[in-house]
Image: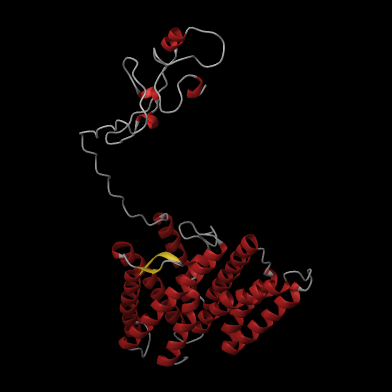
Amino acid sequence: MNDSSWGAPAGTGYWGPDQGPAPAGPAYDGRQAAQTRPMPIVPDVPAGDHQDDHDRGAAQRSGPPFRAETPNEHPQEPMSSPSQPAAPQKKTAGRDLGAAIGVGLGLGAVIIASLFIWKAAFVGVIAVAVVVGLWELTSRLQERKGIKAPLVPLAVGGAAMVVAGYVRGAEGAWVAMALTALAVLVWRMTEPPEGYLKDVTAGVFAAFYVPFLATFVALMLTADDGPRRVLMFLVLTVVSDTGAYAIGWRFGKHKLAPRISPGKTREGLIGAVTFAMGAGALCMQFLIEDGAWWQGLLIGLAVAASATLGDLGESMIKRDLGIKDMGTLLPGHGGIMDRLDSLLPTAPVVWLLLVIFVGTT
């Protein structure tokens, strides 16, 4: 039973001696009803909360019957006890760091083992990552936008693109890219024409965004010191991301691109550039034959820029799709595409600069 069936209109107290006729209903003795009516349970009100009689309700009043007061007629005096200051909130990473570190170490072990033991095995790792990334991207496009980019020709063509890049070089990668795009156009013809243009456009975009950019990792691997070039590429990208996260989390105050990725800051970008340039100088000096430290500084700067742009690019895609992560395959990280976002656009940048500085062999 609500208060209106027992009490007076809003802004008045309990039924008192001068309260007038009782509400409509069975005849009863008003005084007896007022005495036997159960008291509602009232939660404790912290000190410092100032509410008028109307907000508190009649249930919080005690003592003998009193004259009804209109709201704000007699404002309450503030409580004398000082309010306790709120405890400062700790910054959090927003993800399960334990799971993220464990998964990252596991992936790193697989990559390093395949990279230095058998090059062909690492090519297989790239191809698997490409196929899974394409599956995540096309699935999210269909779920969120109703875009049906054909996965079968993309997956087959994407894996072939990586292998062709490793076996036949850049020329093989371009030919495989063209054939994959053609296969997407033809495959989609087996379905009704409605939405054909947006589906094939998304398919060609996916073919370029995931497997074609990943092919430059295979191109790096073809050099005599290919494993060390790929290792440098991976280290610089990870160090750039780590520097951006560490400095941005600790010192970040000025947003870099708040409409795209509110978590990224200008201070984080400075951290990415600093960490990547330092790591680049060390890698070129001690890891790459005929490399110079100043070349590593330039490569590190380029990696920080491309990794940041790649991260922002996928953040733009995810915001358009209305999702936080592309998948849930990697605990603490999201999906495969959430790990490839900064690697994919960085691969052609590192490949090109290494070709310019130390050649293709």
Q: How many marks?
A: 0
Give 316 or 109, whichever is nearer the viewer. 316
Quarter where residue 63 is shown: top left
Q: Compared with residue 50, is residue 99 higher up or lower down, i.e. above or below? A: below
Is residue 24 rendered to the left or right of residue 303?
right
Which residue occupies 43% across, 92% down? 356
Q: Is residue 206 above or below residue 94?
A: below
The quarter of the picture where residue 215 lies is bottom right
Question: At 67% from the left edge and 69% from the top edge, which residue is drawn?
Answer: 149
Indicate the position of residue 352 as horizontal and vertical percent values: 46, 87
Looking at this view, is 360 or 327 the one in front? 327
Q: Is residue 38 above or below residue 224?
A: above
Residue 232 image point, x, y percent: 40, 78
Q: Residue 32: x and y, percent?
A: 44, 7
On the question of residue 117 being in view, the answer is: no
Q: Is residue 83 left or right of residue 157?
A: left
In this orientation, does residue 196 appear? Answer: yes
**Residue 50 location, x and y as percent?**
31, 35
Tell me what residue is drawn at x 29 percent, y 30 percent: 74
Q: Toward the viewer: 221 or 46?
A: 46
In the rendered image, the vertical position of residue 167 relative to residue 250, given as above or below: below
**Is residue 108 toward the left or the right of residue 180 in the image?**
left
Q: What colour scheme was applied to this rendering of the protein?
A: secondary structure
